[in-house]
Image: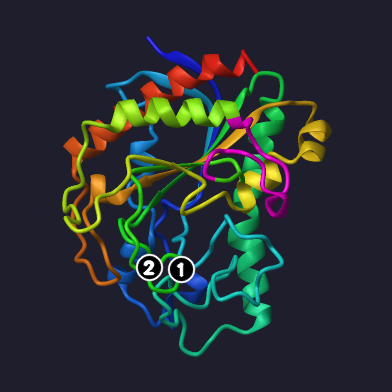
Amino acid sequence: MLTSLPIVQSIPHAGLAVPPSVAGRLAIDDVTIYNECDLWNDQIFDFAHPSLHGQSLAVVGMPIARVLIDANRPPDSLDNPDGAVKSHTSYGDPIYAPALNRQTQQQLLEAEWRPFHTDLDRALTGHAEDVRLFLDCHNMAQHGPSAYGDPGKVRPLICIANFGDASGEAVAANGPLTAPAAFVRRAAAIAGELFADMALLEPDSQHPAPIVSLNQPFAGGYILRHYCDAAYQQAIGSRYAGLMVEVNRGLFVGDQHTRTPIQLPNQPRIAAVRSRLLRWVQAILPLLEQE
């Protein structure tokens, strides 16, 4: 029997596909594409899995590899190497040879980036009366990639983001919170209880990973901001909280770097993470009624 969940899920980074229009222009190989992806994210956030029987209102995924098209970046970020149509990997390596011109970038934006957002808007609009929680679902490398703001730094098992600070409170530079601070603190505490018994596959003995953090190393991205904006929610006639959740890939892949060999998904570990994530969602949903 399926358990209905009043949530809409965004899974923008799990894809591995390459658009045919640029397949012959890549300066990177399948190994790099694999290591830049939010690996198996569609599996760890699959609450409708036969072993779990959860049912979200909608789940919107992106088939194209994140290293090529990033749906979590704004459409006006084409000059950014880490923008919507990327030019460099998270380790600073060029993706194309030669680099794409602006016309090709715009074509990719319209052909690949835009449909994901059309589908996500349709999902939220279609479930405007029922959605209570928007969940932007991600996973992250165990250590920060070299071209990111936390190079080499060990990351928590779980990061929960609402555009706030380490306590979930508002930060003026980040704009409005996407979920109340008290709610995200309680959500973090519950995640901490659920994931306390899990260890990284390749732990860093010199720098133990925290179990849970709020807004570190990520406070949120374009998707969370755009679809939790008050004006957007008013326009579709809805009101819901929004969280971005990042799961450490060290729990089910290992301590990756840009050349980690491709391997099959670790199904026992994926199942362990997936079941805890569903229990976490089921535990935090009633808290929204108290807000």
The amino acid type found where label 1 is placed reads Tyr
**Left or right side of 265 for 277:** right
Which secondary structure is most common in the magenta stretch? loop
Q: Is residue 168 magenta?
A: yes
Labels 1 & 2 near each other (Cβ < 8 A): yes
Residue 284 pos. (x, y %): 49, 21
Neighbour tally class for label 1: few under 14, some 14-19, many 20 plus, Cα within 10 Å: some
Residue 150 pos. (x, y %): 43, 65
Q: Is residue 170 magenta?
A: yes
Q: Is residue 47 among what the camera can see? A: no
Q: Is residue 256 among what the camera can see? A: yes
Q: Quadrant of the C terminus?
A: top right
Q: Using the image as rendered, state which of residue 223 and residue 66 is in the foreground.
A: 223
Q: Residue at x 52, y 19 (%)?
A: 285
Q: Residue at x 44, y 18 (%)?
A: 283
- Using the image, tell me which numbered label, if any, was put on residue 145: 2
Neighbour tally class for label 2: few under 14, some 14-19, many 20 plus, Cα within 10 Å: many
**Left or right side of 282 for 233:** right
Q: Using the image as rendered, state which of residue 102 and residue 88 is in the foreground.
A: 88
Q: Please identify the quarter of the rendering in which residue 169 is found.
A: top right
Q: Residue furthest bottom?
A: 98
What secondary structure is found at the residue carrying circle 1?
Answer: loop
Judge whether 275 appears above or below 166 on screen: above
Residue at the spot of label 1: 148
**Left or right side of 185 for 127:** right
Residue 188 pos. (x, y %): 44, 32
Q: Residue furthest top?
A: 1
Query: Which region of the structure is painted magenta?
Result: 166-181
Q: Residue at x 61, y 46 (%)?
A: 163
